[in-house]
Amino acid sequence: MRHRVAGRKLGRKTGHRLAMFRNMATSLFEHERIYTTVPKAKELRKWADWLITLGKRGDLHARRQALGFIRSKKVVHKLFAEIAPRYADRPGGYTRIVKAGFRRGDGAPMCIIELVEEGTGKAEGTA
């Protein structure tokens, strides 16, 4: 029984799964959108929301926690200086998942996960 067990295993061991989400979160904040499978994107939302909330807090401890998860100091600086202030008045829901069909090789459902742009409702970088 899986009662009260949160999170997906995605067919990976714990260390591999954590490393994968660290890499995905780093790429998401660096490029502000990434192309991945739907189950991975749904799990990544939890990590991204947590990291943006740390950025909104903005203190030294929050910065050190983010540095412990995100792989690049440059990306952590971008998170705290540019991304988090964008969502200062927003209580949550910082990402959007847009379905993008199925992968040709194995038929996996694919999507684009992106940061929502505060104010306009459009994604960052779209026309």
Image: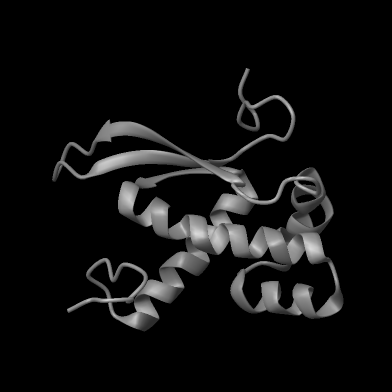
- The spot of residue 116 in percent (x, y) is 62, 37
Q: Name the residue: 61% across, 70% down.
A: 71
Q: Nearer the viewer, residue 21 or 3?
A: 3
Q: Nearer the viewer, residue 23 or 39?
A: 39
| For residue 36, above or below residue 4 | above
In this picture, residue 126 sits left or right of residue 16: right
| For residue 15, above or below residue 57 | below
Q: Name the residue: 76% across, 53% down.
A: 84
In this picture, residue 108 sits left or right of residue 27: left
The residue sitting at the top extreme is 127
Q: Name the residue: 57% across, 58% down.
A: 48
- The spot of residue 17 in percent (x, y) is 37, 73
- The spot of residue 31 in percent (x, y) is 60, 45
The residue sitting at the front extreme is 3
From the image, which quarter does the C terminus lie in? top right
Q: Nearer the viewer, residue 56 or 72?
A: 56
From the image, which quarter does the N terminus lie in? bottom left
Q: Name the residue: 69% across, 78% down.
A: 65
| For residue 78, above or below residue 63 | above
Report the colour scheme.
Answer: one colour
All told, the count of numbered labels is 0
Quadrant assignment, res 32: top right
